[in-house]
Image (cartoon, rainbow, N blue to C red):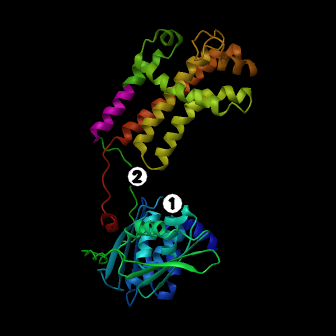
Amino acid sequence: MVLLFLEQARQGHVEAIALFFNHVLEAYKQQVQVSYESGNLRLLITGTPVSVQDKVMPVVLRGILNLQLTGLRSIYLAAQADGDLMPVWQIEISGNQRKLLRTLAELGDEDAIAHLLTQAVAHKHIALHAHLADTHLTIYLEASPAPDQDIALSLLKRELAFWHTPYIQSIEVQGKAIAAEVEWTASMFPSPSARPPRPKPLSSPIVTHAPKVPPAVWTFKFELPKLSLIGFLLAYGLFCARHYNFSDFINGTNPLMMFIHGVNLIFHEAGHTIFSMFGQLIHLLAGSGMQIAVPAVITGYFFFTRQPFAAAVALCWVGENFWDVSVYIKDAQERALPLLGGEGVLHDWHFILVILRCLDKDDAIGNTAFMIGTLIYGFAIFLGVFYAQIQPQPKNQNLLSKI
């Protein structure tokens, strides 16, 4: 059960994240309310008395690092007493893992200190241990032979120069060979301490659950750049689809069509190269398959990242590739199209249809591919028009997203 909710938390499920942090802060008798949207994690810690920032922040940040949330961009932490509307303290931190580790190190976390400093000297094959007592940091370096003092201190200073912390007031570095006595000791001075970030006042209570985005509706109010782009694609489909035939390809009747064909050809040839080891039929199919698969994958990416208009534009490219492939299929018997590489190059669809014993059906198969492309292109235009509209904004906004 624990592993299940932990995995769900890592995937960004708000309830699982809240359960995880409530478990982490159980010893502090604090409760956590969570909002996680578009890579922005918001944690509101409540309880009486209010948790001390310096004590609870390292615990929370260590938990965030352990979760390894996918797509984490920023973290907002706030603490307030039960029943209060205003936080006692709050802070915003980058979700970048290295910056999280640096924040932990600045809060006096020994593991984070050792991790970052080890990274700084690792390329010199130096093992590092760190110990922080009160505000005195002792760094133990060990290598074979003993680490060079000047080089080691220079690498440590380069990393420590970015740290601003009141928790490290003095630093001592000891260097030695493996299984030997300390050969040298040096003192360092940390960067001047920076004050902790001042809390930002909030005018209203924190809303802990992001509002659901309402479904898109027909408003008939359009964003002009989007509408112009989809209008251009509509015009291309209406006036240029008829040029996807043998005669216009040979004569280069439509320069824009030939330019797009040149782009498609890059992915077509890449498909042959990538799948050359999987047998002749797969090798031949991979050319046309790859030129369709690349825009299809791009469409899927935009769809799953909630960029529907961009997905519609990419879907037009998918439909266009079916048109492009249809010309090649219908040339299977005649083999009259000029191929990249000259006369000695195999005509993909001639040999594909020979293997499948469908060579006499090349026109029918090509027309089917063209029709599939037309349906996809038309559907993409419809989606593009729909998602080019200006949608009404939700009435209830999550205050956390405004901070």
Residue 87, percent from left and from top: 31, 80
Residue 199, percent from left and from top: 28, 77
Q: Residue furthest bottom?
A: 49
User: What is the three-letter code of the residue carrying label 2?
Assistant: Pro
Q: Which residue is mark 2?
A: 215
Q: Which residue is mark 1?
A: 70
- Tell me, yes or no, whether the two marked residues, 1 and 2, touch with CB atoms within 8 Å: no
* Bounds of the magenta segment: 221-234
Tell me the element at label 1. loop
Q: Is residue 120 left or right of residue 202?
A: right
User: What is the three-letter code of the residue carrying label 1?
Assistant: Thr
Please rate how many residues cluster around mark 2, counting C-alpha atoms within 10 Å: few if below 14, some from 14 to 19, many from 20: few
Give the number of the mark in front: 1 or 2: 1
- Tell me if residue 18 can be seen: no
Tell me the element at label 2. loop
Please rate how many residues cluster around mark 1, counting C-alpha atoms within 10 Å: few if below 14, some from 14 to 19, many from 20: few
